[in-house]
Image: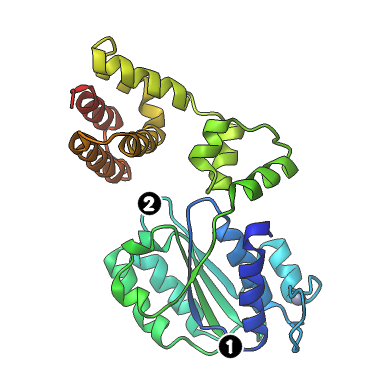
Amino acid sequence: MYSWLHASLQQLSQRAAAYSLHHALLLKGEKGIGKTEIAQQLGQFLLCANKPSLPQEDLGPCGHCQSCLLLAAGNHPDLYEIRSDKQIGVDAIRDAIKKLSGSAQLSGAKVLVIHDAHTMTESSANALLKTLEEPTNNTFLLLLSSHPERLLPTILSRCEKVALPSPTQQECITWLKDEGYANVDETLLRLYGTSPLVLIEHVKTPPKVNYQELVENLGYLKVGTADPAALAAKWQDEAITIVKWLQVWLVNELKASQKNTEHLWQMHGRCVNANEQLRNPGVNKTLVLVNILQSMAQKA
Ligand SMILES: [Zn+2]
């Protein structure tokens, strides 16, 4: 387990061993800190047939019972997972609830993991409510989210919220080193230091544009020597990264400037909107970028 999540996993496991774990947990934390991994580990522990009955220093699944072996092989019949690139539809939820309502195949616990729970549609969330309230015996629901504020209040109120920490910058650097990536670019660390799994993706597959290049072009846009449409066309594949970086840049500008912050706040608001728009798979990314770069070009 990632060092920064070790304590959280131990606390949850201790409670599971003592049968005092809430049946519905919302594991919330920033994107790219390892929510999936902690849910997998906790899920394995809940399903393991050889859980120690007394509290121990370092609790974990036994690794050799039938349950642990099936999990290692990736086909445990009592572990259900729901994930979706876009939205979690009501059919996926209904299907999972149906499976949870039966008895466990291995006569142990049943675990449902809902990745990116905030992408549930309203009807999906409503379909889940009853199960959240009155789950079948020995059933655990693990909802993962980097945007818990997007969850319906009715879902939030039925879950125990567990805030998972991001690593400190030093923890992040140490981990990257262990993964074989020493001397990671300073800017990337600053931008993604609290989301190490996102950071490592950027290190492995560098985006076609770098932050420095974006900042330079913002300067050109202001003096009219760069063309918003040309930049948007060039950057459209990295649209989400560009908008995120614009927000980082704007926050830095806001911190540095004493006056004329209104224009910067306006721009920040536009970036937040653009972010929302870019989550829609059918959106014209170039157009979103053109609009935002054009407004960046306007002088405050
Ligand atoms: Zn086991």
Which type of secondary structure does the marked residue at label 1 adopt? loop
Is 297 drawn above or below residue 165 in the view shown? above
Report the residue at 41% width, 30% height from top.
238
Q: How far apart are marks 2 and 1 (CA)?
A: 34 Å
Residue in the picture at 18% in, 38% down: 262
Quadrant holding the C terminus:
top left
| Image-quarter location of ligand 1 | bottom right
* Of marks 2 and 1, the one in the foreground: 1
Q: Which amino acid does label 1 sit on?
A: Ser
Please report contact status of discs 2 and 1: CB closer than 8 Å, yes or no.
no
Image height of 93 relative to 129, above or below: above
Give the residue pinned by disc 2.
86
The amino acid beneath tag 2 is Lys
Q: In this view, does 14 lie above or below 214?
A: below
> Can you name the residue that lies furthest to the top here?
225
- Considering the numbered disc 2 on the image, is that residue within a helix, a strand or a loop? loop
Across and down, in percent, residue 115 comes to 48, 61
**Along the horizontal axis of the image, is 135 left or right of 205?**
left
The residue at the far front in this view is 258
Residue 150 in view, yes or no: yes
Can the viewer see residue 88 in this picture? no
Horizontal side of 299 relative to 257 (left or right) equals: left
- Which residue bears the numbered disc 1? 20
Extreme-right residue of the structure: 64
Q: Which colour scheme is used?
A: rainbow
Front residue of 237 and 29: 29
Q: Is residue 280 left or right of residue 116?
A: left
- Name the residue rendered at 72%, 69% in the picture: 70
Task: Classify mark 2: residues with Cα within 10 Å, few (<14), some (14-19) or many (20+).
Answer: few
Reading the chain from its start, which is encountered first: label 2 or label 1?
A: 1
Which residue is nearer to you in this view: 190 or 68?
Answer: 190
Name the residue rendered at 30%, 32% in the picture.
Answer: 285
